[in-house]
Amino acid sequence: MHSFPSVFYCGFEKAAKANDIVLTLKLKSDVDLSVSWSAYKSLIYLYPAISTKYTYVTARKRYEWFFLDDKKSHDFLFQEEKEQNTYHSLEAVYSSFFPINESFPIRIRHIDSRTIVFLISHVFADGRTAFSWLDQWCRLYYENNPTQTKTVVNPDMAPVHWNKPGEPANKFGLAWRGMAHFAKLAAKAGLNNKNQTVDISRNKVPDPLSTGSHVANYHFTISETEDILIASKSVDLSTAAFVHRALSSALFELYPEKTRQQFGIASDVSQLFEHADDLAPGCLINPYIQQVVRDQPLVDQIRKVYDEARAGGPMSLLAMSSLIVPSHRFLENHVYNGTLVKTSKRSLFERFTFIYSHVRDQNRPYTHKVVESISGHTKSQTVFVASTIINGHLSLEMCATHMAFSPKDIDAWFNATVRSLKENIFYC
């Protein structure tokens, strides 16, 4: 069961030609390419989990992780050395595609002297573990950089071994809860609400050859971030919930004729599994599908959604999936086929609005030493919004494919959200 989210991205990448978590880093000082490459090589050598492939085992009807042979690892390392010893355009990196098993799942691209893109396969990692892997690279970069003034950052920060997650307890009890959630969601959605749901897509069938995306991002100042944190506490919302409120408020303002939004919250489900350490290969997230409506107080609806998510809603949905999906191959094909229809037909309740992910500041010690700010995204077939806080800066990033969405519509929504957060003014 633990591989279900990873299998999802195996099916998704076939049609979407995308599968990476893309973290854009603004460094505190100019990068040293030789030190960066040395840190990357050390990361590969120190953590065998990176030198793996994700392969379907017919006899077991599931995907499993296996180590690469020495020749393949050497070829991948040679390929990476060429790429990492030069600079790339941000547009080229954002539109790039690396199928699982055809490169290392972790890659680095240099944009300019202060900008690096850290790419990590979503089959291999999720938002939480991507930041753990980033911190390991930052540790190796920091320790090998002669220009850094060395200090003891965290003596207890030892490398974590590779350990495959085990099966969760109480899977059947959780599954019943997941079924109840979907029944409740269907009842609230109603049969006619699809036409009243905010969906800013062009409503086209995805084009696998169209890999270009429109990315909008904003790095809030430390002062702006402090004001946002204070404002979120004043209405009893977490940072993630407060940003989500701004996103939904802006949409209702821009689309006054629409009365409903259906969205997914990327949620960590690692606590379900035994031995799910931060550096284990595999994606351990599950989207929590929820909705809000115009005619009820938005802040109360958002608070309830996030309270339910923290209470285990996403884990119950994953447990439910593990009982009704017969094999990994079935899930992979189901996801693949689901990406070949018009955008308006891709959700269980048809019209879909966006996916949102917030990665909490997990006090990654070496990341704080090397990186000034981070923004991130992953390509999806809806609008993907991500936020994170590092070194006191809240960052917000929105990504959508050119083929499926109008950059003008994305920018209007993004700018309205940023304005709402900076001014603490909400439409609803």
Image: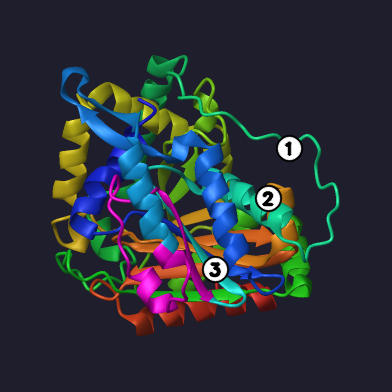
Residue 75 in the image, given as x and y percentages of width and height: 33, 50
Secondary structure, mark 2, is helix
Is 416 in front, or is 194? 416
Q: Which residue is drawn at 49% across and 33% down?
A: 280
Around disc 3, counting alpha carbons within 10 Å, would you say few (fewer than 14), some (14 to 19), or many (20 or more)?
A: many
- Can you tell which of label 1 and label 2 is closer to the viewer? 2
Of the residues under marks 2 and 3, which one precedes in the sequence? 3
Q: Is there a contact, CB below 8 Å, between mark 2 and mark 3?
A: no
Q: Which residue is drawn at 38% across and 16% down?
A: 172
Residue designated by label 3: 116
Residue 154 horizontal side relative to residue 424, left or right:
right
For marks 2 and 3, give the CA distance: 15 Å
Q: Which mark is residue 82?
A: none
Q: Can residue 238 be seen in this view?
A: no
Q: Picture quarter containing residue 205?
A: bottom left
Residue 90 counted in the magenta span: yes
Q: Which mark is residue 139?
A: 2
Q: How many labels does the image show?
A: 3
Q: Is there a contact, CB below 8 Å, between mark 1 and mark 2?
A: yes
Around disc 1, counting alpha carbons within 10 Å, would you say few (fewer than 14), some (14 to 19), or many (20 or more)?
A: few
Residue 78 in the image, given as x and y percentages of width and height: 38, 56
Q: Residue at x 57, y 68 (%)?
A: 33
Say which amino acid is labelled 1: Met
Say which amino acid is labelled 3: Ile
Instruction: Specify start and end residues of the magenta stretch as a single range.
Output: 82-111
Residue 19 counted in the magenta span: no
Residue designated by label 1: 157
Q: Residue at x 46, y 48 (%)?
A: 266
Of the residues under marks 1 and 2, which one precedes in the sequence? 2
